Image (spheres, helix red, strand yellow):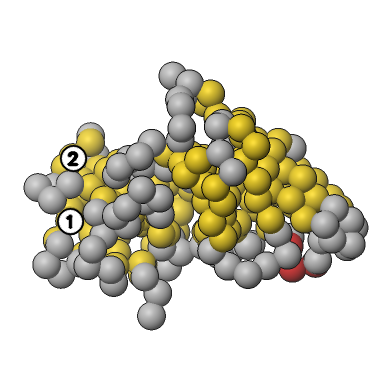
Amino acid sequence: SQTIHQWPATLVQPVGSPLSLECTVEGTSNPNLYWYRQAAGRGLQLLFYSVGIGQISSEVPQNLSASRPQDRQFILSSKKLLLSDSGFYLCAWRDRGNSPLHFGNGTRLTVT
Amino acid sequence: RKEVEQDPGPFNVPEGATVAFNCTYSNSASQSFFWYRQDCRKEPKLLMSVYSSGNEDGRFTAQLNRASQYISLLIRDSKLSDSATYLCVVNTAGNAGKSTFGDGTTLTVKP
């Protein structure tokens, strides 16, 4: 069966520090991968998605970047965090076609 | 206008009540539809897919009206454990198959 791992679970970082969140998927090949962010009390906002190694699409201009160095690895990064980057970051995968998304446990990021 | 709109609630109902959530979407080319459940400070989890013919999973019934671009979720005989935020999700067509989420409807079931 397929599993998705996301770490760390919580993170407190000062403004201006770098960020690296990692997500890996097991039990499937060539999945679509996604990064979402959820601000407190708000809905999910799609940040990036990837349909293959090295292929990244950005949905909104922001202080973040994403990379997919391996088929089942998706990384979210920032060179310098802003206060507004605080939120709940969720990695997700899905098969091609019309299948549903499956989420990792999420990373709760607080920028101080 | 948001691509996917839900009544935010909150819905506060007693145990055993029947409650219905509605969702509308604006992209007529949308391909697939889902309901997710999100508990406080947790990741969303798939509750059920939504099919044109309507589908049922125990106490949960989902309906889709493509002509009206409307999705619904009915929960019968509510349990305390049903308390959560329910998210309507719409997938667009294409290889990337992006999923657009509604902001969610919060349900609290009270004893």
Mark 2 vs mark 1, CA separation in Å: 12 Å
For the point 55% across and 32% down, which residue is it?
A71
Q: Is residue A18 visible?
A: yes
Q: Could you say where residue B86 lies in the image, as x and y percent from the top left? A: 40, 53
Q: Secondary structure at mark 2?
A: strand
Chain designation of label 2:
B
Indicate whether A61 appears above or below B78.
below
State left or right for residue A111 relative to residue B107.
right
Decide which of B33, A32 is in the foreground and name it.
A32
Crowdedness near tag 2: few (<14), some (14–19) or many (≥20) residues, C-alpha within 10 Å = some
Indicate whether B6 appears above or below B41.
below
Q: Could you say where residue B53 lies in the image, as x and y percent from the top left? A: 9, 47
Disc 2 and disc 1 on one polypeptide chain: yes
Mark sitting on residue B64: 1
Chain designation of label 1:
B
Closest to the camera, between mark 2 and mark 1, is 1
State left or right for residue B8 relative to residue A66.
left
Q: Could you say where residue A18 lies in the image, as x and y percent from the top left? A: 85, 53
Question: Which residue in the structure is indicated by mark 2?
Answer: B56
Q: Amino acid at mark 2?
A: Glu
